Image: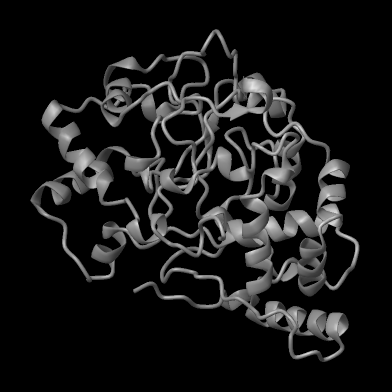
Amino acid sequence: MRKSIYILSILGAVLITATNLSCNRNNGDPSSPEPLQFPLPEGWPQPQYNFSANPLTQEGFELGRKLFFDGRLSKDGNFPCASCHQPIAAFGTYDHDLSHGFDDQHTLRNAPPLFNLAWHREMQHDGGIANLDEQPPAHITAANEMAETIPGVLSKLNADPTYKTAFRNVFGKEEITTEMMTRALSQYMLMLVSSQSKYDKVKQSKDQFDVNEAAGYEIFKQNCNSCHKEPLFTDLQFRNNGLPVNPDLNDHGRMRITGSSSDSLKFKVPSLRNIAVSFPYMHDGRFSDLSHVLEHYNSGIINGVTTDPLLKNKIPLSEVERGLLVEFLKTLTDEAFLNNQSLVEPQ
């Protein structure tokens, strides 16, 4: 069973802030927002997100959840956040290489799965967004994604009495603002914590790997752990993993943000958690299954100026070793997370 504790280093700030906000908003009204615990798994590093600036509440989480699945955040009503970030795929795009957007357009990249976002310093494959709260407007206003304007979204939300009441209960203000909307979305996304896979249970001495999974774990530790560090299974760095550029997309990754040629073809190292259900793989979804991914690291790496030094010699694994590695990677599937009904579309 998942152990949920307050983040010790910010507990006081969160509780004090939540208490002050409750008093200011409601003048002692007992119906003030209920503080919500962030489920920090035992032994994990401290999150990067500043919870003291956006204290979690049950009402804030539920409001963000409603927004996440609401098509009105898009121009034509057909593209809520959840259209690209689907629960069935660990909040990634199920079975599509590039995400679909407004007017039958495609995005530049495969939508990354959304979980454990509290530990991310920068968002997106290229780190182009510095804070989780700043993420939604970029996608709401992208012409090939949700294609709406922020004033357009706020107008729709402010015209809905249910939303007006919900926002007032959470933030204590009558008029819905951009900041209130993005913080509500953050409260929902922060609670997308995946930490209850078989791997986690083994680490907690609540389960055991079978012989193949155990062998695969040893292969993982010898060949993959430098970039896919436990327990997040990513080091959150930007690396060039030797993929040739897709000529149709001409996406050079981190260099689009920094303008530095030293960042060409570098993308954020993805987490391997839930990898068995979050296909297709890579920033552009070019690989449909794990066998293609492992074959790339075995023989497909292109050694360029910015290719990561850890991959210069590739990762040569036999067919048997690759099979064992996949058996271990399957233990990172978090069924409790994938089937958590409190995270899916509210009815």
Q: Residue furthest left?
A: 211
Q: Position of residue 305 (x, y in %)?
A: 51, 16
Res. 340 image quadrant: bottom left
Q: Is residue 325 left or right of residue 136?
A: left
Q: Position of residue 75 (x, y in %)?
A: 76, 35
Image point 22% across, 48% down: which residue? 217
The image's colour scheme reads: one colour
In the figure, is residue 296 to the left or right of 122?
left
Quarter of the figure with residue 158? bottom right
Observer-nearest residue: 246 or 184?
184
Query: Which picture quadrant has residue 124?
Result: top right
Position of 71 relative to 41 (above/below) = above
Q: Residue at x 26, y 43 (%)?
A: 220
- Give the tally of numbered discs: 0
The quadrant of the image that shows the N terminus is: bottom left
Judged from this view, the residue extending furthest toward the top is 247
290 shown above or below 22? above
Residue 15, can we see it? yes
Pick the residue in front: 216 or 177. 177
Residue 179, position in %: x, y? 82, 56
Which residue is rendered at x = 19% and y = 32% of the image? Answer: 322
Q: Does residue 49 appear in this view?
A: no
Q: Is residue 140 above or below residue 301?
A: below
Image quadrant in which the C terminus is located: bottom right
Q: Horizontal and vertical percent for residue 37?
A: 57, 76
